[in-house]
C-alpha cells in the first residue's frame, strides 16, 4: 500500500508526540562564564524534543544567578531556576532538582562545559536499548593527575564493593528514566554512588563512553580531599545497598569473629593458669580481653541498627531554597473572526 502525503504527516505527528519530554538538570556553583555556551549547546542538540533546562544554583558567589535570570528572560518557556540560600553541595542540588523535574527522561550535566551536549542523542539511543540509567564514561580525561588518580582508585573500590562494573561512577553526565528518581534518597555526598544505589534497587544500569573537554573557565571544585571522603562513603554505600534492612549481618560477622578470637585466646590462657603458670604479664592475654570487648560492641551496634531500621523513616531535606523560577508557557496569539452580518 502506497503512503499518501497526508498519511506521512500523520505518522510524523504521532512520532513527535511519542517522544519523551527531557529535563536537563544542571547544578551550578560559580560557573557564570560557562552558562550561555552550555545553554545554547543543550538547546541545539535537543531540538527534536520538548525539553526544559532546570538549573540549581548551589549558593554561587559570582554572577551565575544573574546569568541564569538572563537565560530565563531569553527562553522563559524552557528555563527554570532553583536558587539555594548557600552552598549545600551537589547531592542536595540533585535532590532538589530530581523533585522538581517534569520530564519523562532526566539528564544531569555539569555546568563547566566539560560535558558535550552533542552526546545527547547517543544517550537516548543507549537508554532505549533497555536501560533505566545510562552513565557517562570519561575514558580520555582532560584533567590533572591530582583529579584523575583519586577517581580511578575510587571507581575500582566502588566497583568491587557494589558488584556493578562501571569505569566512572561519578561522571556527572547521566540519563535517567523518571521512575528511577523515586528510588533515590541523596544526602551527604552520595551523588557519587547513584549508579550503585539504582543497581541495588534492581534497575538496569548501562555505561557509555563520552567525550570530555578541558575546563575553559574557573577551577575544579574537587581534588584529593574527596579521596578520603570517598573511602568513608564507600563503606556507607556498601551498608546501604546490601545491608540497609539487615545491619546485624554487616556488623554481626566481624563482631562474632572478634568474640570467638578473644574467647579462644582467653581459653588458652585459662588452661595455662590452671597448670600454675603466671599469665598476668602476657600481652596476648590483654589482646584477648580487648577482642571480646570490641566484638561485643560491634555485635551490639548491629542489634541497635536493627532497631533503628524498624523505627526510622526517610531523611529530611537539608537544603533551603531562596528563590524558585518556573518556566512560563509561550503566549498564544488570539485569532479574531468576523461575524457574518
Image: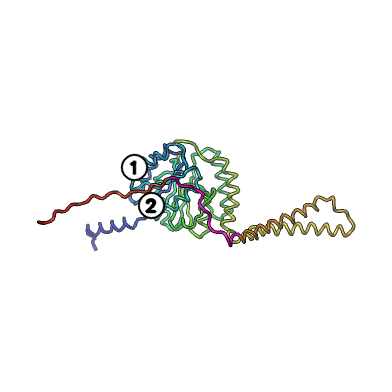
- The span from disc 2 to disc 1 (Cα, nearest Å) is 20 Å
Position of the N terminus by quadrant:
bottom left
Please identify the residue farthest to the bottom as the structure is shown.
1
Q: Position of residue 192 (x, y in %)?
A: 52, 49
Q: Give the structural element (helix, strand or loop) at label 2.
A: strand
Count residues near mark 1 (Cα–Cα under 10 Å), then give few for <14, some for 14-19, many for 20+.
some
Which residues make up the magenta segment? Answer: 308-322
Q: Give the structural element (helix, strand or loop) at label 1.
A: helix
Residue at mark 1: 73
The verdict on residue 309 being magenta is yes
Q: Is disc 2 in contact with disc 1, using a CB cutoff of under 8 Å? A: no
Count residues near mark 2 (Cα–Cα under 10 Å), then give few for <14, some for 14-19, many for 20+.
many
Label drawn at residue 22: 2
Q: Position of residue 11 (x, y in %)?
A: 28, 58
Q: Position of residue 233 (x, y in %)?
A: 58, 49
Label drawn at residue 155: none
Q: Tell me: 291 left or right of 13.
A: right
Given residues 78 and 201, the one toward you in this image is 78
Given residues 259 and 161, the one toward you in this image is 259
Q: Position of residue 217 (x, y in %)?
A: 45, 36
Position of the C terminus by quadrant:
bottom left
Count of marks overlaid on the render: 2
Given residues 45 and 191, the one toward you in this image is 191
Residue at 53%, 53% in the rendered image: 165
Amino acid at each position: 500500500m502506497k503512503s499518501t502525503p497526508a498519511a506521512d504527516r500523520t505518522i510524523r505527528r504521532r512520532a513527535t508526540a511519542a517522544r519523551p519530554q527531557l529535563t536537563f538538570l544542571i547544578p551550578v556553583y560559580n560557573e557564570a562564564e560557562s552558562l550561555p555556551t552550555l545553554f545554547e549547546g543543550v538547546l541545539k542538540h535537543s531540538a527534536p524534543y520538548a525539553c526544559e533546562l532546570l538549573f540549581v544554583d548551589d549558593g554561587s558567589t559570582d554572577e551565575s544567578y544573574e546569568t541564569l535570570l538572563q537565560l530565563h528572560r531569553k527562553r522563559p518557556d524552557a528555563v527554570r531556576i532553583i536558587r539555594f540560600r548557600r552552598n549545600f553541595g551537589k547531592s542536595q542540588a540533585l535532590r532538589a532538582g530530581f523533585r522538581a523535574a517534569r520530564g519523562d527522561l532526566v539528564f544531569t550535566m555539569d555546568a563547566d562545559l566539560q560535558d558535550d551536549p552533542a552526546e545527547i542523542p547517543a544517550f537516548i539511543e543507549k537508554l532505549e536499548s533497555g536501560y533505566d540509567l545510562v552513565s557517562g564514561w570519561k575514558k580520555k580525561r582532560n584533567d590533572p593527575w591530582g583529579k584523575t588518580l583519586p577517581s580511578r582508585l575510587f571507581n575500582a573500590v566502588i566497583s568491587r564493593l557494589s558488584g556493578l562494573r562501571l569505569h566512572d561512577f561519578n561522571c556527572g553526565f547521566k540519563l535517567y528514566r523518571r521512575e528511577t528518581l523515586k528510588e533515590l534518597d541523596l544526602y551527604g555526598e552520595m551523588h557519587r554512588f547513584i549508579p550503585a544505589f539504582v543497581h541495588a534497587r534492581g534497575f538496569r544500569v548501562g555505561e557509555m563512553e563520552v567525550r570530555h573537554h578541558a575546563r575553559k573557565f574557573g577551577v575544579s571544585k574537587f581534588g584529593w580531599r574527596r579521596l578520603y571522603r570517598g573511602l568513608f562513603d564507600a563503606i556507607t554505600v556498601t551498608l546501604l545497598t546490601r545491608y540497609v534492612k539487615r545491619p546485624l549481618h554487616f556488623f554481626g560477622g566481624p563482631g562474632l569473629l572478634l568474640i570467638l578470637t578473644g574467647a579462644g585466646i582467653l581459653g588458652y590462657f585459662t588452661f595455662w593458669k590452671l597448670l600454675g603458670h603466671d599469665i598476668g604479664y602476657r600481652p596476648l592475654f590483654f589482646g584477648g580481653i580487648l577482642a571480646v570487648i570490641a566484638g561485643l560492641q560491634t555485635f551490639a551496634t548491629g542489634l541497635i541498627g536493627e532497631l533503628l531500621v524498624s523505627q526510622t523513616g526517610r531523611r529530611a531535606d537539608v537544603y533551603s531554597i531562596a528563590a524558585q523560577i518556573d518556566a512560563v508557557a509561550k503566549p498564544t496569539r488570539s485569532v479574531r473572526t468576523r461575524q457574518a452580518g
